[in-house]
Image (tube, coloured by chain):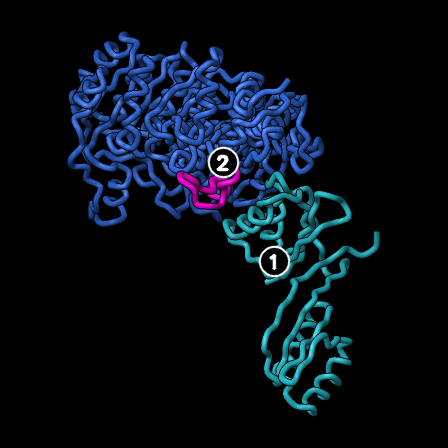
Chain colours: A cyan, B blue
Amino acid sequence: MMKHTIAVWVEDYPGVLAKVAGLFTRRGFNIESLAVGHTEETNISRMTIVVEGDERVLEQIIKQLYKLIEVIKVRDLPTPNSIGRELVLIKVNASSLPIRSEIIQMIDIFRAKIVDVDKQVMTIETTGTEDKVEALIDLLKPFGLREIVRTGKIALSRGK
Amino acid sequence: MKLSGVEIVIECLKKEGVEVVFGIPGGAIMPLYDALYNEPSITHILTRHEQGAAHAADGYARATGRVGVCIVTSGPGATNLVTGLANAYLDSVPLVAFTGQVPTNLIGTDAFQEVYIGGITSSITKHNYVVRRAEDLAGTIKEAFYLARTGRPGPVLVDLPKDVQLAQANFEYPQKVNLEGYNPTYMGHINQIKRVAQSIAQAKKPLICAGGGVIAAEASSELRDLAFKAHLPVATTLMGLGSFPETHPLSLGMLGMHGTAYANYAIGAADLIIVLGVRFSDRVTGKLAEFGSQAKIVHIDIDPAEIGKNVPVDIPIVGDAKRVLKKLNELITPQEKVEWLKMIEDWKRKYPLKYEDNQELKPQYIIEKVYEITQGQAVIVTDVGQHQMWAAQYYKYTEPRTFISSGGLGTMGYGFPAAIGAKRGCPEKRVICISGDGSFQMNQQEIATAVTNDSAITVIIMNNGYLGMVRQWQELFYDKRYAETNLKGNPDFVKLVEAYSGTAFRISKKEEVYPTLEKALALNHFVLIDCVIPAEENVFPMVAPGSPISKMIGVD
């Protein structure tokens, strides 16, 4: 199944997120991730939603979103023409010095950062595409993952 | 000018031209009722259940084309509206519902009679609001009415916390609304309309399928122009009944699950289907893959989300049916596909609607007599079930807004309160409610509303002692295992009406039909006629669920 990234501009008032989420549930569309925040304009929020489905499902999602009065604009952001990023925090077991240095070497390649460390665990931060984030998590798995938190993808179209 | 919140609500209703509202008071909406008490220009009709209020407002809206309004209290009052709102949403009926709410400082505390009705109704309203400041009331109500009646119409809910009703604010009714995310497309794309005109000229077997959108857009006369000019046969959906005169030779009647054989055959054989204001419900299409499989499909609808939702479309046009058809009618040339029309004539001759007209009191016969005595001029309001389909099949509708029925939601209990609302909207018209013994009991408390308000409607109950449509399915698909469809314990409907000081008759013989109808209509008051019909009469033709519509049971 194809993954699609769509940007949704909405009026920024209580209940809007619930309505958008409710729409996806009711119509049986599967949300892979959803990120929301303020934009350059006051009172307008922007959601980045990653969904699974074929072209027909994507078309229905966009049309149904437009039916919500609070939705101002919807754009499909296909990968080659857009920049997508995700932020992730990974807490991993790191109870000995050799392990810690192994992890540090590894995450250097990913240009990830260590944002917290103690005798038991290290917390690593990185941003990147979904593939990169997945790859890093995969590599850290053998050390024992304590907790992971991901923002979900945010995306902008390329060019103006 | 400073006014209280509820005075603002009343002023807004007046600005919107509201003359009647349906509802029931309760704690959280008492301030608004207190303001209504002094308002001579708005009549309030007290129903006996909030569902009745919603359906009455819905019937009023469908019969008149105006926005229906209902008012209820918070909590159970609001939740009792839910079915009515869903019903209006699925059939695109313009409603504005006001609900009382607990004061803003109690919202979220599980206060007495508090529910979050905005959340509950968000998927069954076009939009809804919780008004948190009296200053926002006028703008919100303006928007609510605007949203309800424009674009694809639908119900809008406005939740009014009690303290907002009592607070003071300046009143100024906005001239226009400013909704950035709401811009319905009315004008169809001209190049697409040209393509339709070309397709009509090239087609050998063209036909029109008209739905509720034609009625909502007041496009019946444009539809007639198109059909007459290009000699296009017209099939209508249940919701489209009345958009095209069924007395005209080009009419195919209704298509779909209980449609006419000739309409369903024509859909299967057509090479061009112009679909107007239709959402391709499964009751219309039957097996999707085979619906109009020989045809190029033109879909004209105001709601872009309906286009391509269920059926792939060759020429999509987003727009208002009236404006698109006006343009299209300018572009087409008179033409007549003689062979195609002859084919349809043959089907009509070979496969007419029919029933076994013997000595029994047949429901189809009753509908025919209702048609005869009203000369097709009545507003027919139905409940849901077998009687609904017989009313759709055996009465010939010629004008829009004369067939009022719950299509999408299929709400048993809709018909009676909707008929009260329709009569209030069209006092000069005959309003006849065709119901069943099952459906009628789902809102029979509204007998009080009909009697008290001297609502001169005639209710005809097709009483077969069963939940008839479910029983029919059990007979056909469940080996006659009549699980819980026998309505033993039904009341004596005549005595029931008499208990409310109303008039009612019971008939069980064919020869009683016409004189009883005559008597009932002459009384010009609320009258109920309980018709004892054969228990196992079925609705035919019938397309089994999941079958293509050309495969019908009861056609030979």
**Residue B555, percent across and down?**
32, 37
Query: As shown in the figure, which amino acid type bears the numbered disc 1?
Result: Val
Q: How many marks?
A: 2
- For the view shown, which residue lies furthest in the bottom direction? A98
Is residue A6 or residue B240 the one in the foreground? A6
In terms of image quadrants, where is residue B540? top left
What secondary structure characterizes most of the magenta part? loop
> Which numbered circle lies on residue A51?
1
On the rendered structure, is B26 left or right of A129? left
Between marks 2 and 1 in the image, the one whose residue lies nearer the viewer: 2
Q: Quadrant of the N terminus of chain B?
A: top right
The vertical placement of A15 against B212, above or below, is: below
Rendering coords of residue B373 (x, y %): 31, 12
Q: B456 or B472, which is in the foreground? A: B456
- As for residue B59 lying within the magenta part, the answer is no
Note whether residue B219 is visible: no
Note whether A158 is above or below B77 in the view shown: below
**What is the number of the mark on residue B103?**
2
Which range of residues does the magenta coloring cover? B103-121
Q: Residues within 10 Å of mark 2 (few under 14, many from 20)?
A: some
Residues at badges 2 and 1 in contact (C-beta under 8 Å)?
Answer: no
Magenta residue check for B111: yes
Q: Quadrant of residue B312?
A: top right
